[in-house]
Image (tube, coloured by chain):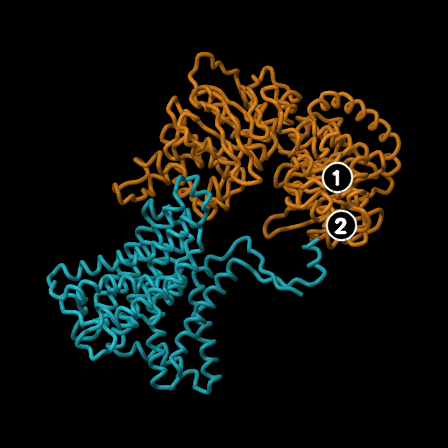
C-alpha cells in the first residue's frame, strides 16, 4: 500500500470519467425501460415512528444509485426491506418487472440481490475461506471455495489470501472479504451500506475502481452514504431521504455538495467559524512523553512511543482508521488505565500518568468517550444522574454535601443539568428524562455540554459526532473550536476525515499504535493524511506493514 | 417452531409497579390448584395460609419475629444485587454472625452489663461481614464466581455450627443435647411488648436498617456508585468508581446485615445457640429482595408477606395435615412468578415458525 496509492489516484479519476461517458450513452439508457429494481410507495412504521413514508425509487441496469440521508432518515429500514430482513407494511417491490415479496435474506440472494453490511459479520478466528463457506447457500458451497475466492478477488482487484485468519486482517481487507463473499453469489444488484466509512482515502479509491468495473459488467449498485463528494464522483443517480420521505431525486454530478447537503438536512447547516490559531509561545497544557502500552489481549493494539504536545488555544485532530489503537489511547490519556511512569503524561505541566480519571479531572481535564450509552452515560439513569457521573469528583464541593455522608444535592445538580441542556440546545421530553430515551445527537450534545460547562483547560474527545445528525454535529464542532480559542487545549480523536480537517489546527495520525508527527492544517491534504493512515509514516520504520504484505493484502 | 423472547422497545411503568401483586395473585391461584390436587379445599387452605395468622395478636407477633431476619437480610442483598454482585450465601453469613456474636455470652458468661448486648451485635456484624469477605476476595482477586463460592460457604458455616454446639460450646448441664448454655438476660434482645407476644427488637432493628439503607442507596454519592456500577460497569469506570471496591462494599454490607439478623434471632427469639438456627432465612431473603424490587423499603412489605408463608405453613400442617415442605413450594412459586412477570414486562414472547426463522438466521 505504501508505494501504490500515489500512482493510483490520477489513474482512477480518468477511468471514472471514461466509464461514465460510456454508460450514459449505453446501458443506463437501455435499462431505463424496465428498471432492474423498483420500489413503489413503500411504508414501514415502528410504533409511532414512520421510518419509510411512501418511498419510491428505481434502479436501472448498470447504474450506481446513491441513497443519501442523515442518520435516522430511513435508509437502513429501506435497505433491510430490500434484503428481506424486514417486511414493508404496504407498497410493492418490483424486480425486473415482476412484483416480488422478499421474505428472507436467502430469498433476496436467490433472486439476485446481495448486500455488504457496514458492520461486518465475520468470525475473527476463522480463515477467509471458512468465513465465505459459512455464508454460502448449500448449492454454491461446492468445490474449491478458496481457489474460487482467490480467482474472483484477483479479477476484481480485491486481492485476498483465502487462508489468512480474519483477526489478522485490516478493516479494509475485511471489507474485501465481505464483498468477495457477496460477489461469489453472482448478484445482479449489490447493496453497499456506508462502505467507505472504515477505509483510508486510498482504500476507498481502490473500492471505487472495483465498483466501476462491476457497473461496466451490467451489475447495479445501491450505494448508501452520507459522504457527498464520493457520491458526486461515483453515482449516476441519487435518491435523497429525509425523515422517512423521499425529498429529491437527482443526478449528483449536476449538483453541488452544498445543494445535496441542504436537501439532506432540510435547512442549511451553520458554517463552522474558525480563525487560525496562534499558539506560538503558548504553554502545552497536555503533554504526552512517549506513552508505551503493551497489548492487553490478542485483538488489542499496543501503543508505542506516543509523543505529543497540545498547546493552549489549539485543536489537534487524531486521524486514523478504526482499530489502530485509538480506544487504547483514549483509555490511557483519560486515566481509565494508568501507567507506572508518572511523567509519561503531563496535565498543565504536572505529572499525571499514574493518576486515576478523577484526579486528572481535578487537574482541569475533561474526557468524552466514543460510546455514548454504557460508557459516557448510563442509559437507565436520568440526565441529572449522568451529570453527576463525570463530575462528582471535580465538582464535589457544589454537588455533594454533609461531609463524609456524601448527600447528593439534587436541586443543585438539577439546575446544572438544565443549564447544560439550555446551553447546548438539548431537545428532550420532560425535565429530566433517562439518558437512554434521548436521540443520539441530543445525548451527545448533553455529554459534551456536561464537560464544557466546567470550562476544562484540557479536553480529550473520542469521536465527537459519531452517529449524530448534521445540525448537532455542527454545534458540537463549533463548541470545541470555541473552547480552544478561549484558551483550552483540545484533542479530538475521529475517524471522520472531513471532521478532522474542519476543526483541527494540526493533525496527527494513528497507525498500528504509533502516532505520526503533527501536520499543520495548512500543509495537510487528504492524500498526505491518507497515506499516513495507511501506514506510510516517515517517522518510523514499518515493521507493522508485513501483515498486509504477508497476506497479499495489497497488490 | 421455536419460542423467542424479544426485548420490548418500551415497557409499562404501571405493570412494573404492579408486577409483585400480579405475581402474588398468580401464586394464590396456583396454590389453590395445588390444594385441590391433593384433595383439600382450596379456600380453606388459602384461608389457613394467608388470613388466619393475622387474626390473633400472638401470631402477629410471630409474624414480626419471622419477618425481622428476612427484612434485615434482604435489605443487604438489595445493595448487593443492585451493584451486580450475586451473594447467595446470606444463610452462611447469618450463621457466622450468630456464632461470633454468641461468643460473648458463651465464652464470657460473667461479662454482664449494659455493654454486653451492643458488643454482641457489633461482633455479629463483623462476623457476617468477614465471612462475606471471603467470596468477595475470591471474586476480586481471582475472578471466581461469587454465586458458587458464597453458596458453598453456607454449608461450611452450617457444619461448623453443628460441630461447635455438639463439641466445644455444648452446655455442660445440657444432658448431652446439642446446644449452648442459655443466654443471660444481659445478652438477650428484649421483647418489644413483653405482655402481648414474642416480637423482639430485632424487628425494629430491621426497620431501621431498611430506612438507613434506603437513604444510603437513593440519596448518597456512595449509593449512586452502587447503582452506576450495577447498571453499567464501563460507565462506572469512566466515573472513576472502583469495581473491586464495590465487590467488597456490597458483600460486606450485606454480610454485616445478615450477621446482625443472625445474632438477633439467636439472642432474641431462641435464647441459645443451637445446631439449627434458621429455617432458611438467608435463602428466603433472596425472594424477599426481588419481590421488594431490590428496594429496601419494598423489602419490608415483601418480608412480611414471606413471613406469612412460614406461619401459614405451620398452620396448614397442624390443621390440614399437609407436609411443611409446602412452605417451600409456595415460596418457590412466588419467586417463579415474580421473575416471570418481570421478564414479560421487559420482553415479549414471539413464536417463530420455520420460514421466518430462516429469515432471521440467514
Q: Is residue B41 above or below residue A464?
A: below
The label number, if any, that marks residue A222 in the structure image: 1
Residue A383 in view: yes
Q: Quadrant of residue A22?
A: top right
Q: Nearer the viewer, residue A14 or B251?
A: B251
Say above or below: A417 vs B227.
Answer: above
Q: Quadrant of the C terminus of chain A?
A: top right
Badge 2: few (under 14), some or many (20 or more) residues near its Cα, within 10 Å? Answer: some
Mark 1 vs mark 2: give the one in front: 2
Which chain is displayed in orange in the rendered image? A
Disc with the residue nearer the chain's start (1 vs 2): 2
Spatial CA span between label 1 and label 2: 21 Å
On the image, numbered disc 2 is attached to which residue?
A136
What percent of the width, then of the height, locates residue A246? Answer: 70, 40
Residue B102 x, y percent position in the rendering: 22, 65
Q: Of helix, strand and loop, which one carries label 2?
A: loop
Q: Tell me the chain of label 2.
A: A
The answer to which quarter of the image holds residue B58 is bottom left
Pick the front one: A510 or A102 = A510
- Front position in the image: A418 or B294: B294
B161 sits to left or right of B137: left
Mark 1 residue element = strand
Amino acid at each position: 500500500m505504501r508505494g501504490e496509492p500515489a500512482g493510483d489516484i490520477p489513474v482512477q479519476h480518468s477511468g471514472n470519467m471514461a466509464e461514465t461517458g460510456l454508460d450514459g450513452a449505453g446501458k443506463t439508457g437501455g435499462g431505463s425501460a424496465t428498471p432492474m429494481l423498483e420500489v413503489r410507495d413503500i411504508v414501514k412504521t415502528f410504533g409511532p415512528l414512520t421510518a419509510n413514508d411512501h418511498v419510491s425509487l428505481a434502479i436501472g441496469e448498470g447504474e450506481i444509485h446513491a441513497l443519501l440521508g442523515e442518520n435516522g432518515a430511513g435508509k437502513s429500514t429501506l435497505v433491510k426491506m430490500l434484503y428481506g430482513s424486514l417486511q414493508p407494511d404496504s407498497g410493492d417491490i418490483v424486480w425486473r418487472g415482476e412484483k416480488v415479496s422478499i421474505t428472507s435474506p436467502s430469498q433476496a440472494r436467490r433472486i439476485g440481490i446481495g448486500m455488504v453490511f457496514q458492520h461486518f459479520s465475520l468470525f475473527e478466528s476463522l480463515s477467509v475461506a471458512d468465513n465465505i463457506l459459512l455464508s454460502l447457500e448449500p448449492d454454491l458451497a461446492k468445490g474449491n471455495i478458496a481457489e474460487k475466492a482467490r480467482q474472483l478477488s484477483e479479477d476484481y482487484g480485491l486481492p485476498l489470501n483465502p487462508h489468512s485468519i480474519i483477526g489478522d486482517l485490516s478493516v479494509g481487507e475485511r471489507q474485501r472479504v465481505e464483498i468477495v463473499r457477496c460477489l461469489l453469489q453472482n448478484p445482479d444488484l449489490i447493496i453497499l451500506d456506508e462502505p467507505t466509512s472504515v477505509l483510508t482515502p486510498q482504500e476507498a479509491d481502490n473500492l471505487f475502481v472495483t465498483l466501476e468495473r462491476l457497473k461496466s459488467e451490467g451489475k447495479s449498485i445501491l450505494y448508501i452514504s452520507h459522504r457527498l463528494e464520493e457520491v458526486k464522483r461515483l453515482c449516476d443517480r441519487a435518491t435523497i431521504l429525509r425523515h422517512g420521505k423521499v425529498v429529491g431525486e437527482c443526478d449528483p454530478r449536476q449538483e453541488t455538495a452544498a445543494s445535496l447537503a441542504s436537501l439532506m438536512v432540510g435547512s442549511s447547516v451553520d458554517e463552522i467559524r474558525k480563525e487560525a490559531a496562534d499558539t506560538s509561545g503558548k504553554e502545552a497544557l497536555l503533554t504526552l512523553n512517549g506513552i508505551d502500552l503493551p497489548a492487553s489481549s490478542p485483538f488489542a493494539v499496543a501503543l508505542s512511543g506516543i509523543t505529543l504536545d497540545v498547546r493552549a488555544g489549539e485543536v489537534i485532530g487524531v486521524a486514523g482508521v478504526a482499530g489502530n489503537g485509538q480506544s487504547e489511547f483514549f483509555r490511557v490519556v483519560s486515566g481509565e488505565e494508568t501507567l507506572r511512569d508518572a511523567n509519561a503524561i503531563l496535565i498543565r505541566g504536572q505529572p499525571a500518568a499514574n493518576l486515576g480519571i478523577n484526579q486528572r479531572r481535578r487537574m482541569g481535564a475533561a474526557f468524552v468517550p466514543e460510546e455514548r450509552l454504557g460508557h459516557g452515560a448510563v442509559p437507565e439513569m436520568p440526565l441529572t444522574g449522568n451529570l453527576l457521573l463525570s463530575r462528582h469528583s471535580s465538582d464535589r464541593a457544589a454537588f455533594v454535601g454533609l461531609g463524609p455522608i456524601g448527600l447528593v444535592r439534587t436541586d443543585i445538580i438539577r439546575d446544572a443539568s438544565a443549564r447544560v441542556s439550555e446551553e447546548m440546545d438539548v431537545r428532550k421530553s420532560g425535565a429530566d428524562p433517562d439518558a437512554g430515551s434521548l436521540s443520539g445527537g441530543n445525548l451527545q450534545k448533553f455529554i459534551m455540554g456536561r464537560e464544557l460547562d466546567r470550562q476544562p483547560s484540557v479536553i480529550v474527545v473520542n469521536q465527537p459526532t459519531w452517529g449524530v445528525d448534521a445540525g448537532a454535529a455542527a454545534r458540537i464542532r463549533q463548541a470545541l473550536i470555541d473552547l480552544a480559542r478561549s484558551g483550552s487545549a483540545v484533542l479530538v480523536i475521529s475517524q471522520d476525515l472531513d471532521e478532522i480537517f474542519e476543526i483541527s489546527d494540526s493533525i496527527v495520525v494513528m497507525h498500528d499504535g504509533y502516532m505520526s508527527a503533527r501536520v499543520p492544517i495548512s500543509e495537510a491534504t487528504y492524500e498526505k493524511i491518507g497515506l499516513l493512515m495507511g501506514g506510510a509514516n516517515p517517522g518510523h520504520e514499518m515493521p507493522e506493514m508485513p501483515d498486509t504484505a504477508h497476506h497479499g493484502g495489497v497488490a | 417452531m421455536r419460542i423467542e423472547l424479544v426485548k420490548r422497545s418500551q415497557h409499562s411503568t404501571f405493570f412494573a409497579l404492579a408486577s409483585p401483586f400480579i405475581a402474588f395473585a398468580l401464586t394464590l391461584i396456583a396454590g389453590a390448584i395445588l390444594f385441590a390436587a391433593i384433595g383439600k379445599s382450596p379456600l380453606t387452605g388459602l384461608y389457613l395460609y394467608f388470613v388466619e395468622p393475622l387474626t390473633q395478636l400472638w401470631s402477629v407477633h410471630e409474624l414480626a419475629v419471622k419477618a425481622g431476619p428476612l427484612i434485615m437480610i434482604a435489605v443487604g442483598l438489595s445493595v448487593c444485587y443492585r451493584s451486580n454482585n450475586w451473594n447467595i450465601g446470606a444463610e452462611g453469613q447469618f450463621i457466622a454472625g450468630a456464632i461470633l456474636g454468641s461468643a460473648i455470652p458463651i465464652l464470657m458468661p460473667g461479662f454482664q452489663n449494659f455493654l454486653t448486648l451492643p458488643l454482641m451485635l457489633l461482633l455479629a456484624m463483623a462476623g457476617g461481614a468477614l465471612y462475606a469477605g471471603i467470596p468477595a476476595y475470591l471474586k476480586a482477586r481471582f475472578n471466581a464466581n461469587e454465586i458458587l463460592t458464597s453458596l458453598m460457604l453456607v454449608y461450611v458455616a452450617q457444619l461448623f455450627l453443628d460441630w461447635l454446639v455438639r463439641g466445644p460450646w455444648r452446655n455442660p448441664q445440657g444432658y448431652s443435647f446439642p446446644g449452648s448454655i442459655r443466654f443471660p438476660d444481659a445478652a438477650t434482645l428484649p421483647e418489644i411488648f413483653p405482655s402481648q407476644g414474642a416480637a423482639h427488637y430485632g424487628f425494629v432493628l430491621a426497620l431501621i436498617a431498611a430506612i438507613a439503607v434506603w437513604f444510603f442507596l437513593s440519596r448518597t454519592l456512595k449509593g449512586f456508585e452502587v447503582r452506576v456500577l450495577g447498571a453499567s460497569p464501563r460507565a462506572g469506570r469512566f466515573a472513576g468508581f472502583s469495581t473491586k471496591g464495590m465487590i467488597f462494599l456490597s458483600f460486606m454490607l450485606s454480610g454485616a446485615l445478615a450477621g446482625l439478623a443472625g445474632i438477633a434471632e439467636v439472642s432474641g427469639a431462641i435464647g441459645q445457640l443451637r445446631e439449627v438456627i434458621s429455617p432458611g432465612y438467608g435463602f428466603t431473603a433472596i425472594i424477599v429482595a426481588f419481590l421488594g424490587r431490590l428496594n429496601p423499603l419494598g423489602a419490608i412489605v415483601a418480608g412480611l408477606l414471606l413471613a406469612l408463608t412460614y406461619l401459614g405453613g405451620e398452620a396448614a400442617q397442624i390443621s390440614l395435615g399437609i407436609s411443611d415442605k409446602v412452605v417451600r413450594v409456595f415460596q418457590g412459586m412466588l419467586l417463579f412468578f415474580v421473575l416471570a412477570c418481570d421478564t414479560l414486562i421487559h420482553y415479549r414472547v414471539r413464536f417463530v415458525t420455520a420460514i421466518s426463522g430462516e429469515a432471521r438466521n440467514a
